[in-house]
Image (tube, helix red, strand yellow):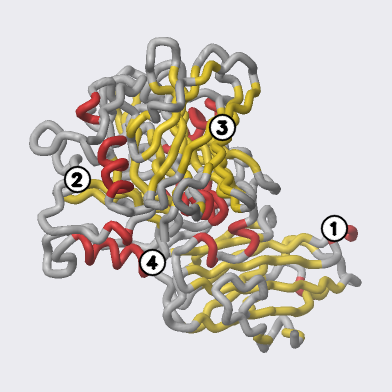
Amino acid sequence: MVRLRTCWLAAPVFLLFFGLELSAAAGRQARSPSSAPHASSPDLVLQGEVRGSQNHTYIEVPFHVPAGVRRVTLTFAYTGRDQHTALDLGVLDPIELRCWSGGNKSLLTIGISDATPSCLPGLIPSGEWKVLIGVPNIRPAVTSHYTAQVFFTRSGVVADQPPGLRAPLRSGPGWYRGDLHMHTANSDGQCPSQTGNLVPCPVFFTVDAAARRGLDFIAITDHNATSQYDAIRELQPYFDKVLLIPGREITTFHGHLNFLGTTDYLDFRLGSSAVPNMNVLLRNAQKLGALVSINHPAAPSGEICMGCGWTPAHPVDMHLLTAVEAVNGGSQNPAFSGIPFWEHQLDLGYRLTAIGGSDNHRPMIPLDQPGSIGWPTTVVYATELSTPAILDGIRSGRVFIDLTGSRDRLVNIDAQAGAATAAMGGMLQTSRDEVVAIDVHTVECQGDSVHFFADGRELPDAQPQAITAAEQSLHFQWRADGGRHWILAEVRDSEGRLLLLSNPVYVNWK
C-alpha cells in the first residue's frame, strides 16, 4: 500500500539555456583537431596582423564552417590596447551579418535558438564565414596582432559547448538550491502590465524572482518552445549568481515531461507518425542527451488541465526516465501529490530521483506564498554550480525536496553496513540479518521531527526523533532481510505536515 501525504502547498499552479599566420588581406586557417565531445581546444585558430595603414577600414578573415554544425563560438584577442588600438568584432555567414558587437565583447556564440546579444540565432549554414574586424583606431606606427579561436558544436547539450559557455558560476562541491519548473512569456507565463492587464511576462521577471529568493539555479521550462533560450543567453551574464539551465516542458496529450540540459529541438507530437508512442519520444530525448523527468503525474487531465496527468496509452519503459516531479507547486489535496506515483515506481524497481518544481506561471506572486518561484525547492548536492554538474547531481539521486521554499533547511541521509557505506541516492549491499546504521543530518529544522520510512511505510520500530538543535545528526538501526528495499527520511512539523523529503538509500538493488 502506498500512503498519501499532505503537502504544505497551495492550489495547483498547473491549473491557472546555455597556428599559421593569417594576413589581413588574404587568410589561411590553422586547424586544431577537436574530436572529443567535451574538447577544450578550438577547431580553428585564426591569427593575423592589423597595421597602422589600415585605420578606419574593415577586414574580412574567412573560415569554413562544415555541415552539421549547430553552434559557432568565437573568442577574439588582440595586442596594442596600451597604445589605444581599438578593434571591433563581427561575424558574417555566407548570406548575412550574424554579429556586430563593436569592441565591447571578446566572445560571441551563434546557435540555432540562442546567440550572444548583438548576434542573430538561427540555422548555421555550411560554407565560408568571415570574422569581420572593424578598425576605429590604430596609430600609424603600430602593428596589432590578433587571435580568433573558433569552436564548432554539433549538439545542443550544454556539456558539449566550449569552455567559455559552460564555465561554472561557482566552484566546489556543495548543496545547491533551485527550481526546475517555471513558465514565461514564451508559453503561458503572465504578469500585470503597467496598466494592470495580464500580459505575457518577460523572462527577466522570472529570473529576478529566483535571484531574490536566493536560488542557485533554475530551469525555465516553457511548453515545447525553444525561444526562451535566447533570452537566457542575454540574462545569464547579469544574473551571475543564478545558473540558468536550458529546459522545456514537453507537453503532450498524455502527460508532461521536463527536458533539461540541451537546446536541441524534440518533436513533441505524441501520437503522430513521427512520434507514435511515449517510448519513441523518450528514446529521441535520450539520443539528444537530455535529462527527462515526469511532471505532476497525478494532476487531473481533460478539460480541468488538458494532458497534465500521466496517461500514456501504451506501457512506458521507465528506464528511459531519470526523475519524477514528486512535489509540484502545489497541492494540499493528497490526490494531486506526485509522491505516491514516485513511490510506486520505486516499488517496481525503477531508481527515479524525486524532484520538485514550482510550476510557476506568475513570477509576481509574493515569495512568501506557496507556488512562488522556488517553492518547493529542489536541493542538489553537486561538484560545482554548472548545468552538467547539477544534472549529474540529479542523476546520482543525492537530492532532497524542500516543501517550504526556505533558504537554509537541509536533510541528508547516509547508510552503513559493515565497511560498506552509501550516500543518499546510492546503493548498499547487505546480507540477511545484517544491521544497517542510518544517519540523518538536518539543518535549521529545530522544533520538527525526523520520520523513517522503508518501502513507503513508516518503520514501526523507529519512532520519530525530535530535532532540538539548528544542526543535528540523528541515528537509527534497521535489520536487513536480504531483500531489495529503499529507505528514506522525512522532516515533519508538529502538526504532521511534510516539510523536507529525502531521496532513498537503495538496499540490495542491482
Dot 3 or dot 1, earlier in sequence: 1
Relative to the observer, which residue lies in front, 229 or 62? Answer: 229
Q: Nearer the viewer, residue 320 or 135?
A: 320
Residue 178, image x, y percentages: 50, 37
Q: Residue furthest front?
A: 433
> Residue flagged by tag 3: what amino acid is it?
Val
Asked whether disc 3 touches disc 1, contact meaning CB atoms under 8 Å apart, the reply is no
Q: Which residue is mark 3?
A: 440
**Counting residues from the N terminus, which is met first, the one under dot 2 or under dot 1?**
1
Q: Is residue 18 positioned above or below 95 on the image?
A: above
Disc 1 is placed on an element classified as loop
Dot 4 lies on which element? loop
Spatial distance from mark 1 to mark 4, Cα to Cα?
A: 46 Å
In depth, the one of 32 and 368 nearer the eye is 368
In space, the residues marked 2 and 1 are separated at their CA atoms by: 62 Å
Q: Earlier in the sequence, mark 3 or mark 4?
A: 4
Look at mark 2 in the image and give the residue it sits on: 310
Q: Nearer the viewer, mark 3 or mark 1?
A: 3
434 sits left or right of 49 in the view: left
Marks 2 and 3, how far apart at CA: 33 Å
